[in-house]
Structure formats: structure tokens, C-alpha cells
Image (spheres, rainbow, N blue to C red):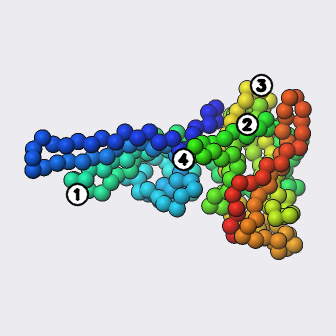
Amino acid sequence: MKKLYSAVTASVAAVIMWSCGPAEMGFTQEYTLQGLYTVNKATVAPEFSDTFFFVKNIDQYDLKTGDRALLLLHYYYDAYSGKAAQWNINEVLLRIPTYSLSKLADVDTTVYNTPITGLQPLNFFNNFDAMSWVWKDKQNICIKYKGVEEGASFALAVRGVKDGYIELELFVDAQESEKETATLLTFNIADIKDYLSNEDKAQLSDSIKTKIYTKRIKNDTLTDWVIDGNYIVYF
């Protein structure tokens, strides 16, 4: 993506209206909310939250259970209408694909050899930024690289378990460009045990975190880079 949107940027426009009549009064509330959501049937769940919103018009969009997307939601509530509050999608800003994990031996490093240039913070609520995190069996990482967005491919391979970390290695394959591209990558790690040896599985615990290895280019120098995961992986 050419621009990495803020994940939660609330644009609130609450409207309170009182009627002129002495016996009746009305109250309405309305605002829009932009965020990163995971779809489950007719509901969407915001990142880092166990709540969910029922979206009335979700059938108008090609969204299915498990999809992740940056959405602009619209909220409307009329206290005196007798109807429940309504959430609707105003716009699907960006669809976030979810990739599968790879075996390290299956990654062709002669092809997946585009170095990244750094991480791109994704802004959430209350000025909270995240660059690498695990949530609901998804490893997320916001990277920047000098390459063409169209046709770019990504792989996250499993190295093993060491010193309380599940070690992963990130690979990028993109056509070289002087223009820097930022993107949010999401990988499904629910089946990560299938990529681990019995010895590695024995080291798993509730407090284990992820550590991502990759190649970074800085000041025209290519170096190995290690990114510690921000959030605990629960099995």
C-alpha cells in the first residue's frame, strides 16, 4: 500500500437535538470511527479488543469471516426511536491479506532477497503505536522497503524456539525501486506448532514471545536485523 492508514483515528461528530415542544425531547448520537477490524459473519472486532460491532450493511461489501481490513464505520443512535444503535460501513479503506507461514527450507532466498528499510508505526487509540504485535493467532508487522508494491511477495519462515522466543525469519520479494513502500503484513500463526520439532514444542509456555529476523538496509549498508515481538503468544 502506498499509504499506511492510522488504525484507530476517531472522527467524532456527536449531534444532540432538542425539540421545541415542552413535553417531548429527542437525543441522537452520531460519529465515524476508523480502525483495523477482523470480520466474523455480520460483526467486526477491533484490534486489541474483545468487543465486536454488528454491522447492518456488511452484505454490501465482499467481506467474509476471517477477513481483516481498515474500515471507516458510521455509528448512529436515536434514544427515542425505540431502535437499537446502528453500525454501518462507510468505506473499506484497505483489505489486509493474511498469509500462511513457510518452512525455512522452502524459501528461495535468491528470489526473496529484498531488504527492508525499517518499520512503520501504526497508530492506535490513545496515541498508542505498534509496529510488531501478535493478536488472535496473527503475527503482524509494519515494514518499509524500497520496492514496487504491485506484485510484491512476502514469506515468514519458522526457525524454531530459543531462549523463550519463537524465532521467525521475514523475507520480501519486490521489484527494486527508489520509492519506499510501507505495508502491514499479517501472518496466521495458529498452526505454528506444525512447524516445530518436538524439542521446540517442549519449550513453549504462556509467556513466550516472537522474534523476527530479517535483512535491513540502512545508509546503503545491508545488515542482519532482529525485531522482538511486542505481545505474548498464547497457545
Please give the residue where the numbered disc 3 appears in the rendered image.
178
Rounded to the nearest whole Å, what is the CA distance between mark 4 and mark 1? 31 Å
- Counting residues from the N terminus, which is met first, the one under dot 3 or under dot 4? 4
Q: Position of residue 16 (x, y in %)?
A: 27, 43
Q: Residue type at mark 1? A: Gly
Distance between mark 3 and mark 1 Cα atoms: 57 Å
Estimate the x, y position of residue 151 in percent, counting from the top left.
71, 37
Q: Rounded to the nearest whole Å, what is the CA distance between mark 1 and mark 2?
A: 49 Å
Could you say whether the residue bearing mark 4 is in a helix, strand or loop? Answer: helix
- The residue positioned 87% from the left and 72% from the top of the image is 199
Disc 2 vs disc 4: Cβ atoms closer than 8 Å? Answer: no
Dividing the picture into quadrants, the one containing residue 109 is: top right
Farthest residue toward the top? 178
Q: Which residue is mark 4?
A: 125
Check disc 4: other Cα within 10 Å, few if <14, some if 14-19, many if 20+.
Answer: few
From the image, tell me which residue sits under label 1: 82
Question: Which callout, 4 or 1, points at the residue further toward the start of the chain?
Answer: 1
